[in-house]
Amino acid sequence: MDLTDIVQRGWDAVGSGDFDTLVKDYLEEMTFIMPGQENVLDGRQSFRTALDGLVDILPKGFEITGLQQIEGAEEVVPIVEWNSERIASSQLTVLFKFKGDKIYEERWFIDTEQWKSAF
């Protein structure tokens, strides 16, 4: 299985709200770095717990409208096109770093000023 397939399976799990399936592709000692790079979650259980509040941390009307994925050696970088009630169109990127077929780091890159204005 390609690494992009693993990441796509994760996007599909998020879309269906199946967070237990999503976290199976992460190592126990994973790290999640949120937009702005200041908020960090350490460990798969912390990440899983945060997913229960996902609807609360996304802008109202958040929708992914396009997705392209670039695979490198032990990493995948999706380019995500999105919109919300206050943002007509934007993009963000996410870096997924792998050890074998498991994600050990997920790091979001987004225009934080625009992101804040979406709320």
Image (tube, rainbow, N blue to C red):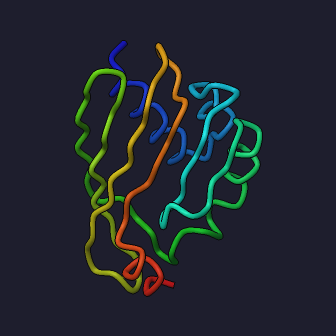
Residue 116, position as x, y percentages in the image = 47, 82
Q: Is residue 95 above or below residue 103?
A: below
Name the residue: 37% across, 81% down. 114
> Farthest residue in the front direction?
38
The mark tally for this picture is: 0
Name the residue: 50% across, 48% down. 15
Give the quarter of the image for residue 82.
bottom left
Residue 3, position as x, y percentages in the image = 36, 22
- In this picture, residue 67 sits left or right of residue 27: left
Q: Which quadrant of the rendered structure holds the N terminus?
A: top left
Name the residue: 38% across, 58% down. 109
Give the quarter of the image for residue 98.
top left
Q: Is residue 118 above or below residue 70?
A: below
- In this picture, residue 22 sits left or right of residue 95: right
Residue 78, position as x, y percentages in the image = 31, 44
Seen from the viewer's position, the closer of residues 4 and 17 is 4
- In this picture, residue 38 sits left or right of residue 4: right
Residue 19, position as x, y percentages in the image = 65, 40
Name the residue: 69% across, 43% down. 42
- In this picture, residue 69 sits left or right of residue 25: left
